[in-house]
Amino acid sequence: MTRQRFLVAALLASSLALVLGGCSSFVDRPQRPVLFDLGPLPPLTAAPAAPAEPRIAVVLPDIEASGALDGTPVLYRLAYSDDHQLRAYAQSRWSAPAPQLVRQRLRQQLGRERPVLSLDESAALDRAGLGALYLLRLELEEFSQVFDTPERSRGVLRLRATLLATTSSGEQRVGQRSIAVEGVAPTPAASGGVRALTRAIDAAAADIDGWLRQSRPAR
């Protein structure tokens, strides 16, 4: 009798373990957020023509940002519902804070035409071969995916740019402007917003490059 009770108890314990094991497969497990970066640079459509004069080197410090923009969440707005509310995707993140990724992409794009330096590099730089040197300060004002309808969205980037020329007597302001660019999102999801924002950054780089070509410090 004791042996029979032992066998019954063992069978019950085994059955309970199987039931609990099966139930565990239905329990939601925490999911790791999907990480996004800005991807590789697009190839140049043609080799850049040799400049008539040397391009002015640019110092690009860290981009300033505040609030939710100075973080890793991928942000979006519902323009058709409440465009004053900035929301974040629950399971989508940038691989680094957004200002860092924007700066890295701009440096890569602008660096195709001229030397682009960090503050540390400029401090240790022998400027004899570079001539004039610009300081480009940027403030990130908007970096989000904006939904005009549930199916249609765009990436919106706004920057406040201040251009300074370094002279023997100090920094001289050359100009200041607001840069607002957009990119169309191929899909109404975080991945589509990331691609749209990448296109917006590339458009901003082209805008800044044209501005730098036209800008000359006052003599």
Image (cartoon, rainbow, N blue to C red):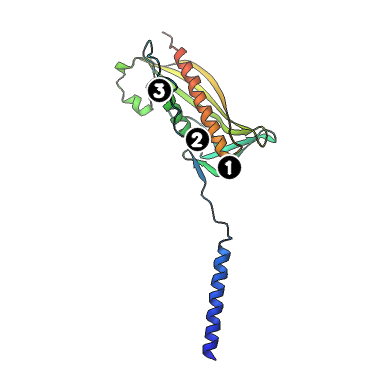
Please say if the residues under marks 1 and 2 sit with CB atoms less than 8 Å apart: no
Task: Give the number of callouts.
Answer: 3
Q: Is residue 7 above or below residue 171?
A: below
Q: Is residue 147 above or below residue 163?
A: below
Q: Which mark is residue 98?
A: 2
Dot 3: few (<14), some (14–19), or many (≥20) neighbours within 10 Å?
few
Q: Is residue 210 above or below residue 9?
A: above
Q: Position of residue 132 (x, y in %)?
A: 37, 15
Circle nearer the N terminus (3, 2): 2
Q: Which amino acid is tagged 1?
A: Tyr
The residue where tag 3 is placed is 112
Front-lying residue, 11 or 167:
11
Please say if the residues under marks 1 and 3 sit with CB atoms less than 8 Å apart: no
Q: Which amino acid is tagged 3?
A: Arg
Residue at (33, 25) in percent of width and height: 123
- Calculate the distance from the C-alpha at mark 1 to the C-alpha at mark 2: 14 Å
Q: Position of residue 93 (x, y in %)?
A: 52, 42
Q: Is residue 87 above or below residue 126?
A: below
Report which quarter residue 131 is drawn in.
top left
- Calculate the distance from the C-alpha at mark 3 to the C-alpha at mark 2: 22 Å
Front-lying residue, 100 or 183:
183
